[in-house]
Image (cartoon, grey):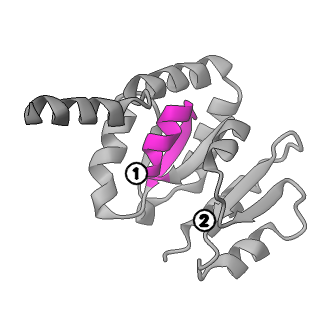
Amino acid sequence: PENVTSQIVVALARIETPRFAFRILIGGSNRNLDQVKSAIEGDPRFEILSDVNQMGEQYRWADIGICAGGSTNWEMCYFGLPRIMIELAENQTPLARSIHDAGSAVNLGWYADFQPDLLLQHVLKLANSLHERERMAQRSRALVDGKGAGRVIKKLVDVLN
């Protein structure tokens, strides 16, 4: 609702290298879609994908993600995607901070305090450090191994028995 995506896109457009490619994943009902499109107009490095169903494919495509601080992070942890988070709602703050503290993502904090230069600093640092991206990926995979549902079922069965 605060059109943070457009702010991020405007910041990323300042990166002056053609070696970057950006995919913007956005819901089809996002009322700011036209503003986002205007922000990337004429820049061939940007592509907008709307109402994506196969998120795993997008996570595998990306070297770095930029996302909200919410539950999508658990999926990104599973795929080992290094990322930069921005808190868009108060209920995201505890998760975003704990994932940051675990070293699997960078938390830029509350969206109203968004600093484009800080975002660019972290994007470029990650883009230029395979070691840092691998470290974040390993820490992410350590948080989410994809076997949680099985563990929950086992506990429920143990309790019922």
**Quarter of the figure with the C terminus:** top left
* Number of marks in picture: 2
Residue 107 appears in the rendering: no
Q: Quadrant of residue 20?
A: top right
Camera-nearest residue between 51 and 70: 51
Instruction: Determine the residue positioned at 48% across, 48% down.
Output: 85
View extreme (front): residue: 161
Q: Residues within 10 Å of mark 2 (few under 14, many from 20)?
A: many
Quadrant of the image occupied by residue 13? bottom right
Q: Residue at x 17, y 36 (%)?
A: 156
Along the polypeptide, which appears first: circle 2 or circle 1? 2
Q: CA distance from mark 2 to mark 1?
A: 18 Å
The amino acid beneath tag 1 is Ser
Magenta-tinted stretch: 68-86
Q: Say which residue label 2 marks.
A: 5
In reply to whether residue 73 is colored magenta, the answer given is: yes
Q: Position of residue 105 (x, y in %)?
A: 47, 36
- Residue holding disc 1: 71
Question: Residue 116's x, y, as percent?
Answer: 59, 55
In percent of width and height, residue 150 lies at: 33, 31
Q: Is residue 68 left or right of residue 15?
A: left
On screen, residue 84 above or below 145: below
Residue 6 higher or lower than 33, as above or below:
above
Tell me the element at label 1. loop
Inspect this view and state whether residue 161 appears. Answer: yes
